Image (tube, rainbow, N blue to C red):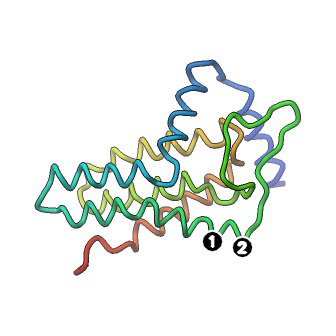
């Protein structure tokens, strides 16, 4: 029953509200979310803007690429294949054929949660994390449950990640 719901949600996301601009926006979000690099960049920018918490912002930013590695280890254990909808090829590429959990979601949620621990105003970054995450099934790259799994893993990582050498 859950697999059927997952497939129905994926099909709905792949067939509704598609247009050239929306697809381009989600493709761009997918590119900036690759390898957790945007989160490292955000950490560096925030460290420059807030020297009093420089170490915390940098540690949080490094979590992005680190979370990708953790995510890949989980992918190797689960070994779920990416979705394949007949007549609806994915609208992007991926470095692996493994799907669960979504690495984009894991790294995005992990860093947004970690940065919110530093400053509650950083919760605004959850908007970017959610946008990146929604794009994954929209583009046909992941099942919705892959995104949910990535959000759970990312939340856990964001809550336990050290935010400095002393924390």
Task: State if disc 2 and disc 1 touch (CB < 8 Å).
Answer: yes
The residue drawn where x is 44% and y is 60% is 110
Where residue 117 appears, as percent x and y from the top left, is 30, 63
Residue, far top: 20
Residue, far bottom: 166
Q: Which mark is residue 73?
A: 1
The residue drawn where x is 88% and y is 35% is 86
Residue, far front: 95
User: As drawn, is 11 to the left or to the right of 93?
Assistant: right
Question: Residue tagged by mark 2?
Answer: 77
The residue drawn where x is 55% and y is 62% is 152
Vertical placement of residue 97 versus 128, above or below: below
Mark 1 surroundings: few (<14), some (14-19) or many (≥20) residues within 10 A: few
Where residue 3 appears, as percent x and y from the top left, is 81, 53
Q: Which mark is residue 89?
A: none
Q: Quadrant of the C terminus?
A: bottom left
Which sits in the foreground, 159 or 52?
Answer: 52
Vertical placement of residue 133 versus 26, above or below: below
User: As drawn, is 165 to the left or to the right of 24?
Assistant: left
Mark 2 surroundings: few (<14), some (14-19) or many (≥20) residues within 10 A: few
Q: Quadrant of the N terminus?
A: bottom right
User: As drawn, is 92 to the left or to the right of 109?
Assistant: right
The residue drawn where x is 86% and y is 30% is 87
């Amino acid at each position: 029953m859950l697999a059927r719901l997952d497939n129905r949600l994926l099909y709905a996301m792949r067939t509704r509200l598609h247009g050239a601009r929306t697809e381009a926006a989600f493709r761009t979000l997918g590119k900036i979310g690759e390898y957790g690099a945007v989160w490292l960049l955000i950490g560096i920018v925030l460290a420059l803007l807030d020297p009093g918490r420089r170490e915390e912002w940098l540690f949080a930013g490094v979590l992005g690429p680190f979370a990708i590695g953790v995510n890949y280890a989980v992918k190797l254990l689960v070994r779920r294949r990416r979705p394949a909808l007949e007549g609806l090829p994915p609208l992007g590429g991926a470095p692996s054929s493994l799907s669960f959990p979504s690495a984009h979601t894991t790294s995005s949620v992990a860093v947004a949660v970690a940065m919110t621990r530093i400053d509650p105003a950083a919760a605004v970054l959850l908007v970017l994390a959610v946008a990146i995450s929604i794009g994954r099934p929209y583009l046909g790259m992941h099942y919705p449950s892959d995104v949910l799994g990535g959000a759970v893993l990312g939340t856990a990582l964001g809550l336990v990640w050290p935010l400095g050498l002393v924390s």
